[in-house]
């Protein structure tokens, strides 16, 4: 009899704990994620007009008449791998390179550019621009260090409709 009471007690506790987790999970999905914008590397999510994910990004001036920044071939790595953006849910890309609202993509892949011994001259890069206005949307979701598993967490943010809680840099909500 005591054994039956013990089993019933354990089952009751397990059931009550499990149901609380479900309620907490649903509750947390409805609550807005608060993004940390303290100093540190920003977390940029974006969509482009074309498939440029393997092309090297450069930065143009506001009027798009000159190159203001471009990488050295050794700068194309992030955590030991080529800094190709990470594909996320709903066609979003997670930047690993440091793009801005003035990004343009050149007709050289990360792989080819990374093997160059020195950076090309800015004039030659300007002539290689594939698209000088490629962004459909660009979000800043705060400091990159706030995420334990950035891909997983940002996919969740996208899927539950919380991307609107990030700062919109380019595009419309």
Image: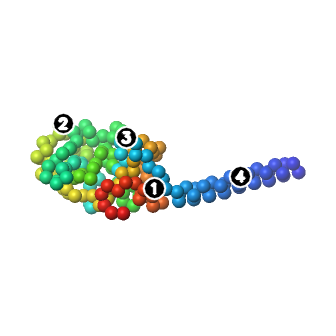
Q: Residue at x 25, y 37 (%)?
A: 74
In primary-sequence order, the first of circles 4 and 2 is 4
| Nearer to the camera, 130 or 154 | 154
Which of discs 1 and 4 lies nearer the camera? The answer is 1
Which of discs 4 and 3 lies nearer the camera? The answer is 3
**Circle 1 crowding by C-alpha within 10 Å: few under 14, some 14–19, many from 20:** many
Q: Residue furthest right?
A: 1
In this image, 158 relative to 31: left or right?
A: left
Distance from disc 2 to disc 3, alpha carbons, whole Å, reads 30 Å
Q: Which residue is mark 2?
A: 117
Which of discs 2 and 3 lies nearer the camera? The answer is 3
Q: Where is the C terminus found, in terms of image quarters?
A: bottom left
Residue 70 coordinates in the image, percent (x, y)? 20, 44
In primary-sequence order, the first of circles 1 and 2 is 2
Distance from disc 1 to disc 2, alpha carbons, whole Å, reads 40 Å
Q: Secondary structure at mark 1?
A: helix
Q: Residue furthest front?
A: 38
Q: Which residue is mark 4?
A: 14
Q: Secondary structure at mark 2?
A: loop
**Circle 3 crowding by C-alpha within 10 Å: few under 14, some 14–19, many from 20:** few
Q: Which residue is mark 1?
A: 157
In this image, 26 relative to 114: left or right?
A: right
Distance from disc 4 to disc 3, alpha carbons, whole Å, reads 42 Å
Q: Secondary structure at mark 4?
A: helix
């Amino acid at each position: 009899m005591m054994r039956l009471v013990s089993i019933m007690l354990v089952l009751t506790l397990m059931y009550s704990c499990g149901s609380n987790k479900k309620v907490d999970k649903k509750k947390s999905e409805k609550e807005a994620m608060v993004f940390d914008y303290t100093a540190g590397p920003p977390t940029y999510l974006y969509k482009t007009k074309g498939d440029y994910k393997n092309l090297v990004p450069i930065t143009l001036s506001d009027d798009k008449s000159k190159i203001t920044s471009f990488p050295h071939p050794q700068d194309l790595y992030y955590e030991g791998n080529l800094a190709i953006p990470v594909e996320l849910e709903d066609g979003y890309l997670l930047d690993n390179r440091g793009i801005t609202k003035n990004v343009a993509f050149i007709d050289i892949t990360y792989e080819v550019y990374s093997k160059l011994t020195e950076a090309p001259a800015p004039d030659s890069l300007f002539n290689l621009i594939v698209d000088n206005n490629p962004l459909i949307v660009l979000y800043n979701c705060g400091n990159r260090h706030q995420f334990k598993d950035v891909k997983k967490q940002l996919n969740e943010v996208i899927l539950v409709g919380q991307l609107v809680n990030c700062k919109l840099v380019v595009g419309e909500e």
